[in-house]
């Protein structure tokens, strides 16, 4: 297993688990105590010599690329992407559905390939709307009402984050990330991530965050073994 350097979060001690079950006593023992101490040490040594079924936790590394990226910002998790020269030969743009149901967008988060269409549907008896804005900007990308049974299509035309909201219902929000990379995944809220399915090879690994200052990029060489990457290089 290889990992790329940078500050490490939750690092495990190299070389396995710490010793347990025995302690080493050091110091000066006075004459009056020496006899007792010798007996104590003898008994202690016997006790320690007894076989102990010691469970050594074997933390199995996740498959693919895993590690640590920037944590979520304003409730939006980071996106980790692997891009390579071969990306243009991968799957073509497609149509994905984001439904409005139960006063929520479903799914609430979506990663789409650039050029793909997001179809917003309304599967309940309430009237909703769909407001799209590029992340961090006020510019409206889409502003449509979605009555029950309606469907509105939006064709993605730029890489980056899109904030989704229904202004009729506070808190009814979602997030779409548009990417050209063949392999992308949302990190967890704490920034930990796992990205599987990419064949071995050289890649540019990118971390996208709502906060521009937390975005980061590095070049990796993915082999057959799991690879740990810790980004961004701060903290
Ligand atoms: Cu709504």
Image: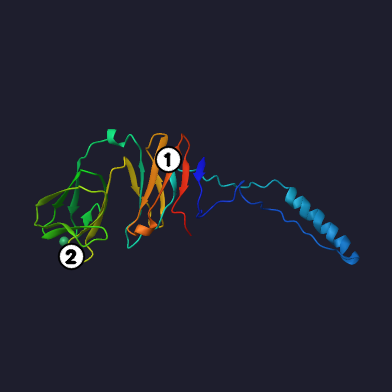
The numbered mark, 2 or 1, whose residue comes first in the sequence reads 1
Which residue occupies the foreground of this view, 43 or 190?
Answer: 190
User: Which mark is on residue 64?
Assistant: 1
Residue drawn at (79%, 54%) of the image = 43
* Chosen colour scheme: rainbow
Residue drawn at (88%, 60%) of the image = 35
Q: Please, is residue 33 above or below residue 11 in the view?
A: below
Which residue occupies the foreground of this view, 129 or 202?
Answer: 202
Q: Is mark 1 within 8 Å of ligand 1?
A: no
Residue 187 in the figure: left or right of residue 233: left
* Gap between marks 2 and 1 measured at Cα: 39 Å
Residue denoted by label 2 = 169
Which residue occupies the foreground of this view, 29 or 157?
Answer: 157
Total marks placed: 2
Residue 206 in the figure: left or right of residue 47: left
Q: Is residue 90 visible?
A: no
SS for tag 1?
loop
Q: Is residue 58 visible?
A: yes
Q: Is mark 2 within 8 Å of ligand 1?
A: yes
Residue 169 pos. (x, y %): 18, 65
Residue 127 in the figure: left or right of residue 178: left
User: Which mark is on residue 49?
Assistant: none
- How many neighbours does mark 2 have within 10 angstroms: few (below 14), some (14-19), or many (20 or more)? few
Q: Nearer the viewer, mark 2 or mark 1?
A: 1
Residue 183 pos. (x, y %): 33, 41
SS for tag 2?
loop
Residue drawn at (21%, 56%) of the image = 105
Q: Quadrant location of ligand 1?
A: bottom left
Residue drawn at (34%, 47%) of the image = 185
Q: Is the C-beta separation of discs 2 and 1 under 8 Å? A: no
Residue 82 pos. (x, y %): 36, 42
């Amino acid at each position: 297993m290889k990992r790329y350097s940078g500050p490490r979060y939750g690092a495990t001690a190299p070389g396995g688990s710490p010793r347990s079950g025995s302690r080493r006593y050091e110091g000066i023992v006075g004459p009056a105590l020496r006899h007792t101490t010798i007996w104590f040490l003898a008994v202690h040594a016997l006790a320690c010599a007894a076989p102990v079924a010691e469970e050594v936790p074997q933390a199995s590394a996740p498959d693919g690329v895993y590690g640590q990226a920037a944590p979520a910002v304003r409730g939006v998790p980071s996106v980790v992407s692997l891009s390579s020269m071969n990306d243009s030969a991968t799957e073509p743009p497609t149509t994905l559905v984001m439904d409005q149901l139960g006063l929520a967008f479903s799914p609430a988060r979506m990663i789409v390939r650039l050029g793909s269409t997001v179809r917003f549907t309304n599967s309940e008896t309430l009237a909703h709307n769909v407001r799209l804005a590029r992340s961090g900007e006020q510019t409206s990308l889409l502003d449509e009402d979605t009555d029950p049974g309606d469907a509105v299509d939006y064709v993605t035309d730029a890489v980056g984050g899109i904030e989704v909201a229904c202004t009729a219902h506070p808190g009814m929000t979602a997030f779409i990330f548009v990417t050209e990379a063949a392999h992308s995944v949302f990190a967890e809220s704490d920034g930990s991530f796992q990205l599987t399915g990419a064949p071995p090879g050289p890649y540019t690994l990118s971390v996208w965050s709502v906060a521009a200052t937390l975005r980061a990029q590095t070049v990796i060489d993915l082999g057959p073994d799991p690879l740990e990457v810790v980004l961004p290089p701060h903290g």
